[in-house]
């Protein structure tokens, strides 16, 4: 999306917008997102998620004490953790777009990259709660960051530190080449995994078919795929800019264009909806989950989509 002048950012309607805006720690943000989400599940069909006991495993530093089997400790003087039926040792990769266009913020409190990084942190936290191995890849024109999946307690801090560094990384001039990057992801991932792609899908129009082909390639190799399409819906979907002449600048190429938003709004909105619907249908035809997320809303929809997918795979 091109950048444009705008008014001061509005507060987002997150799980706890005041707390989220004030927290400095990526880990605390991840915990806030997931704990608030899990609390909201108490009346949902997921009530009782992961409550069917299966077996024990040794305690590792970082495990939650509420899962310690104290009866076993009383008999053996050793700490063991209760594992559950849903703990199926799934492998996950979060694949995060870090190109220049992801730094667009509009009037939201977070840029698309910040939103995507906090979503990734929440997903990693949720995955590790389920004892699943989770890893991270990040890309712009190519894949530039890889953290292999692990379920070890130290993995959480490794991933959160990496996400924090990605948010701070200078992306000036970097363009999106998701098709090439996802083809590289398909080559790098060996074992069957759940691949969660977080991107704004801002490719050249001619590259959209290549991107769909790359996603289908991941499916062909046996991976399950979820695509989270992250947008600032007010401006990037509905073109809600002030009705006056404005100068737009492409955040990836630097190209500039003078535009009067009111003259383009209706056509732009129709074109944006057409593109998203076409992309969504193409994904569904190949059993790829697809969800559009608005940076002005909470992470609830994304976490539910992930949990739905995981339930189907368990």
Image (cartoon, rainbow, N blue to C red):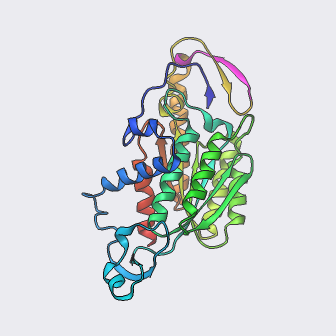
Q: Position of residue 132 (x, y in %)?
A: 50, 69
70 w.r.t. 201: above or below: below
41 w.r.t. 259: above or below: below
Can the viewer see residue 268? Answer: yes
- Quadrant containing the N terminus is top right
Q: Residue furthest bottom?
A: 75
Residue 66 part of the magenta segment: no
- Quadrant containing the C terminus is bottom left
Which is nearer the eye, 235 or 89? 89
Q: Is residue 17 left or right of residue 229?
A: left
Q: Quadrant of residue 18?
A: top left
Q: Is residue 89 left or right of residue 173?
A: left
Q: Residue furthest left?
A: 43
78 w.r.t. 127: above or below: below
Can the viewer see residue 278? Answer: no
Q: Residue at x 42, y 68 (%)?
A: 312
Q: Residue furthest front?
A: 77
- Residue stretch in magenta: 254-262
Q: Position of residue 184 (x, y in %)?
A: 73, 59
Q: Residue at x 61, y 66 (%)?
A: 149
197 w.r.t. 77: above or below: above
Q: Position of residue 280 (x, y in %)?
A: 51, 49
Which is nearer the eye, 41 or 69? 69
Q: Position of residue 79 (x, y in %)?
A: 41, 79
């Amino acid at each position: 999306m091109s950048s444009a002048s705008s008014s001061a950012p509005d507060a987002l309607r997150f799980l706890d917008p005041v707390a989220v805006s004030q927290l400095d720690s990526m880990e605390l943000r991840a915990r806030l997102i997931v704990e608030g989400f899990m609390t909201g599940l108490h009346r949902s069909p997921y009530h009782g998620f992961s409550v069917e006991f299966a077996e024990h495993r040794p305690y590792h530093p970082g495990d939650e004490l509420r899962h310690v089997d104290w009866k076993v400790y009383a008999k053996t003087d050793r700490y063991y953790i209760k594992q559950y039926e849903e703990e199926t040792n799934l492998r996950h990769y979060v694949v995060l777009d870090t190109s220049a266009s992801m730094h667009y913020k509009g009037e939201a409190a977070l840029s698309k990259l910040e939103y995507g990084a906090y979503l990734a942190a929440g997903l990693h936290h949720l995955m590790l709660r389920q004892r699943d191995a989770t890893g991270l890849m990040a890309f712009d024109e190519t894949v530039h960051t890889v953290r292999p999946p692990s379920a070890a307690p130290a993995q959480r801090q490794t991933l959160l530190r990496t996400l924090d560094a990605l948010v701070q990384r200078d992306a000036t001039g970097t363009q999106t080449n998701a098709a090439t990057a996802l083809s590289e992801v398909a080559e790098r991932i060996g074992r069957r995994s759940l691949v969660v792609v977080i991107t704004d899908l801002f490719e050249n129009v001619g590259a959209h078919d290549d991107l769909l082909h790359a996603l289908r390639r991941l499916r062909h190799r046996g991976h399950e795929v979820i695509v989270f399409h992250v947008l600032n819906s007010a401006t990037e979907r509905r073109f809600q800019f002030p009705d006056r002449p404005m100068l737009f600048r492409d955040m990836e190429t630097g190209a500039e264009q003078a535009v009067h938003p009111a003259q383009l709004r209706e056509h732009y909105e129709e074109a944006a909806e057409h593109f998203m619907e076409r992309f969504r249908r193409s994904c569904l035809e190949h059993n790829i989950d697809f969800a559009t997320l608005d940076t002005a809303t909470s992470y609830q929809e994304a976490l539910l989509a992930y949990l739905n997918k995981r339930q189907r795979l368990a």
